Image (cartoon, helix red, strand yellow):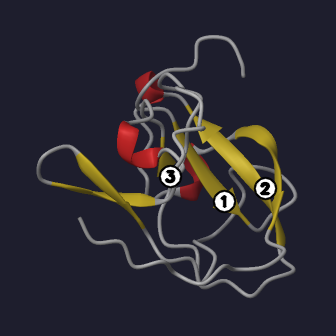
Amino acid sequence: TGVGLQTGDMLMVQDTVTCGMATGRIAGIPEVMTSRPTQQRDFQMDGSSPRWSGGQYFRMETARPGDVFDPLKVTVKPGITARLCWCGKYDNCNPDVPADFQRDAGAITIVRLEAELKVTW
């Protein structure tokens, strides 16, 4: 959690020591993560996930019609540790420009990738 976080804030995973210094995206990491509130579809099958407001929930995903969000496939080699670089909604960052993401939000280590689960409704 933090102060002033909201829907539309973005995180970019950068393979660099200092946020904003990356020259491009990491192969296998598809997009920036844009914050949005959780929806019922995001919960576990038993309904156990908490309800997060915008600014607290980030996921690599693509939007589909009807306010439906599907996760994007991450294919990066496990074992990588990279920076999580943040950009606020009102900073008007370009999701394709790593230099726009200059605020350090921590680190992420990809330990393993889970098999993709096919869900039909």
Marks 2 and 3, how far apart in space? 31 Å
User: Which amino acid type is marked by label 2?
Assistant: Arg
Up-down relation of residue 72 to residue 112 (above or below): above
Mark 1 vs mark 3: in front: 3
- Would you say the residues marked 2 and 3 are in contact, meaning their CB atoms lie under 8 Å apart? no
Along the horizontal axis of the image, is 9 left or right of 12?
Answer: left
Query: Mark 3 highlights which residue?
Result: 45
Q: On the picture, is 24 further left or further right than 71?
A: right
Quadrant assignment for the C terminus: bottom left
Q: CA distance from mark 1 to mark 3?
A: 28 Å
97 sits to left or right of 81: left
Q: Amino acid at mark 3?
A: Met
Q: How many residues crowd around disc 1 within 10 Å: few (fewer than 14), some, or many (20 or more)? A: many
Asked if labels 1 and 2 touch by Cβ distance under 8 angstroms, the answer is: yes
Circle nearer the N terminus (2, 1): 1
Q: Position of residue 48 (x, y in %)?
A: 60, 38
Q: Nearer the viewer, residue 20 or 54?
A: 54
In the picture as drawn, the residue positioned furthest to the left comes out as 65
Residue 64 percent across, percent down from the top left: 19, 57
Q: What residue is shown at x 47% (from left), y 25% (from top)?
A: 54
Secondary structure under the numbered disc 3 in the rendered image: loop
Please name whichever residue, 19 or 71, is drawn nearer the observer in this view of the structure.
71
- Give the spatial CA distance, label 2 vs label 1: 6 Å
Q: Which percent across, then down, holds residue 61?
A: 41, 59
Helix, strand or loop at mark 1: strand
Q: Which residue is mark 2?
A: 83
Q: Residues within 10 Å of mark 2 (few under 14, many from 20)?
A: many
Q: Earlier in the sequence, mark 1 or mark 3?
A: 1
Residue 5 picture quarter: top right
Mark identifier at residue 13:
1
